[in-house]
Image: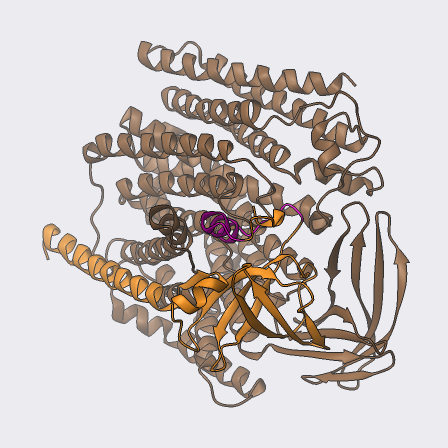
Amino acid sequence: MYTIELGHFALILAFAISIGQVGVGIAIWRAATNSGVAFMRNASVVQFVLVAASFAALMFAFATSDFSLLLAYEHSHSEQPMLYKLTSTWGNHEGSLLLWVLILTLFGAAVALFGGRLPRKLHVLVLANQGLLGAAFVGFTIFTSNPFARIAAPPIEGRDLNPILQDIGLAIHPPLLYIGYVGFSVCFSFAMAALISGKIDAAWARWVRPWTMASWIFLTLGIAMGSYWAYYELGWGGWWFWDPVENASFMPWLAGTALLHSALVMEKRNALKIWTVLLAIMTFSLSLLGTFMVRSGILTSVHSFASDPARGLVILGILTFFICGAFILFALRGPSLRAGGVFAPISREAALVLNNLFLATATAAVLVGTLYPLILDAASGIKISVGAPFFNLTFGALMVPLLLVVPFGPFLSWKRAELMSVVRRLFGAVLVAVIVSIIFTAYTWQGASLLPLGFLLAFWVMVGALADLAERAKLFRVALSTSLRRLAGLPKTVWSTAGAHFGLGVTVLGVVVVSGFETELITTMRPGEQAQLSGYTIEFEGERLLQGPNYITEHGDFLVSKGTGTPRVVASEKRNYTARRMPTTEAGIKTFGFSQIYVSLGEKTEDGGRVVRVWYKPMITLIWIGALIMSLAGAYSLSDRRFRVAAPNRSKKSAQKQMVGEPT
Amino acid sequence: MTRKQKRLTIIAGLSSVVLAAVVFIALAMSSTAAFFVVPSEVQERQLAAGQAFRLGGIVKSDSWKQTDTVHDFLVTDCIVDVAAHFEGIMPDLFREGQEVILEGALNAQGTFEATNVLAKHDENYVPKDMADKFEEKGLCPGHTDAT
């Protein structure tokens, strides 16, 4: 098919255009003229269209099982269901990189199309920087990881995709995660443009915040989805492993969360400018670092596929170029930025600084834990592993004070606040949180432990978020109808803050409950036998051998019932994928309320039984529900008009007006 | 407070938190990091019983005995064999003659009590730490998987 060559050609054309975009961008900036802006915008859009065409060509080859394409031969199989044929496109190093580039150019095009109100100079610089990123990564794809390589004599059958990846998760997790990861490139480009032009003010923060928010929403969803996928697919029952690859996606999330909060201070108070620009650079640098760690092959995991070390060096070069370049520019230009508004040690700004402090330190802790073994190995050859104990200890310890102060933030007024009056106003929330925690502890009592403190922390964050809404609506202080009217009239950003903080509390509650009360049972069962676990009865009905599209499976049926409730069927499988002769375990999961029963099939025993592993995961779904609430809250704030309308000449006035008008 | 004092208060507060965090991270690192060890190093390193580390090697052929969920096998680097014990369900890709990485510690009898077994994810997966170490020490030269 010619489509493959057309796709290849489109990608090369996109590479050429991105280089042109950088050159013209620099020329426009140097010449101090406004002509050529249209070129920059068109170039960004055309670049996206070309990469999209090239991606479509690749996908078409996978969909039609065209094994003359080396990549399709190595990573797909004609008997795969259509969905997996399509997702196989990015279930490998080259294709996944092309997806990364596709999203990068998508954001470039989005900035070109939606940035019409930006000052022209800034717009040109942002697009030039996106073009530079595009040139680097499209170039990397073409020259080191070309997905369009052909085989002269096409084989009849492909070698199939890694069975672990043959799941709906592959259709959702990578695109979401990449949109989050790569979306921060826009923040990075804005930071670079600001440093080059030397103009950073509240308006800048206003333009950056929607992009940060959008990326953050997708990254939150992507990480949550990845966590759930690992949970049900790998069959070990864990939902977070502190695997370096997970950390690679978690670090930009932490830094991005910090950026979201510091940009708020910058937008409203014109303070923390230098720090916000630095955070914007760091967030995307961590995304790049993540890409490097996953794509270079220095780590081994399900994500890394098989890759060759030469690529690692090139991508390290790109990484060094962008990160060092950004920091050098920052060092040169940073000091010339004028410090903005002052604030007292007790104020909303200070609370947000505290938030940034803990998030940045937590990011550093994760970074140290992830990179130290690699650096130590490279420097001295000593191989150590830093695992869950390190991360739970350091990250956990840093999150406790952060969670404690979360509810205070929205209650403090800008510039200077009275701590005592805030404490008075939050007293009701403390009381409610304590009462709810006591009831919850009594309800889940299993003996003395420190867990109730964890519950209190989670409920404190949740109740604190609701208290913010109640306070602003003057609930119980004025007539209920007035309160409701006030509530309906609150700005969307207030709702979204409360929602996101509430979601955080929900996730924390899920983490605490499942870590404290999870139970596990490993036993041998013969058909008809029953086992008991934490008030649930699990009955093994029997097993049969079934044939899937490209695998054979030992399919075990179980009946799970809670107490005396009606039994529900859970199926767990042990599959063997024929093309790769690789076994996988498909866990059987049944949800009861917020809790889940997780059944994993083990080996056959000689007497016709099965080793079966069953987990009771109390309230585990709250972990992902919380993340979902956080993303939805973020998305709700994006729909706020004030977030989008950013006419540069009006921004200063409206920012002031908003400050005054906002209830505190 | 003057503008300068305010700023100093905030900076001093922040620095003390950062300093505390750095000390804390360093302490946590030294107490939780686990060394990667191959069987022939187990003796030479004089690892105490109960000290957590990762043991990497090849599951010796015909050494794997299992009764239901209790597994006993030998981990070898073609020079020294270390007896290992694990209770639970083995990963799908645990096989004799293939690489494995175990997390756990030695018990008083010198048997490695594994709390976690890491086998390969797919046929392209080579535990990198182990491949490097085997190559560097020239262990099991004929073992294709380990290179």
Q: Colour of chain A?
A: brown
Question: Which residue range is magenta in the image?
Answer: B123-139
Looking at this view, name the residue that lies furthest to the bottom. Answer: A447
Q: Which chain is orange?
A: B
Q: Relative to residue A144, is residue A297 depicted above or below? A: below
B6 or A172, nearer to the observer:
A172
Residue at horizontal 62 percent and vertical 59 percent from the top: B119
Residue at horizontal 60 percent and vertical 48 percent from the top: B142
Q: Position of residue B54 (x, y in %)?
A: 48, 64
Q: Position of residue A350 (x, y in %)?
A: 27, 56
- Asked which quadrant contains residue A454, the reply is bottom left
Q: Position of residue A337 (x, y in %)?
A: 22, 34
A24 or A118, nearer to the observer:
A24
Assign the N terminus of chain B to one quadrant of the image: bottom left
Residue at horizontal 37 percent and vertical 15 percent from the top: A26
Scheme of image coloration: by chain
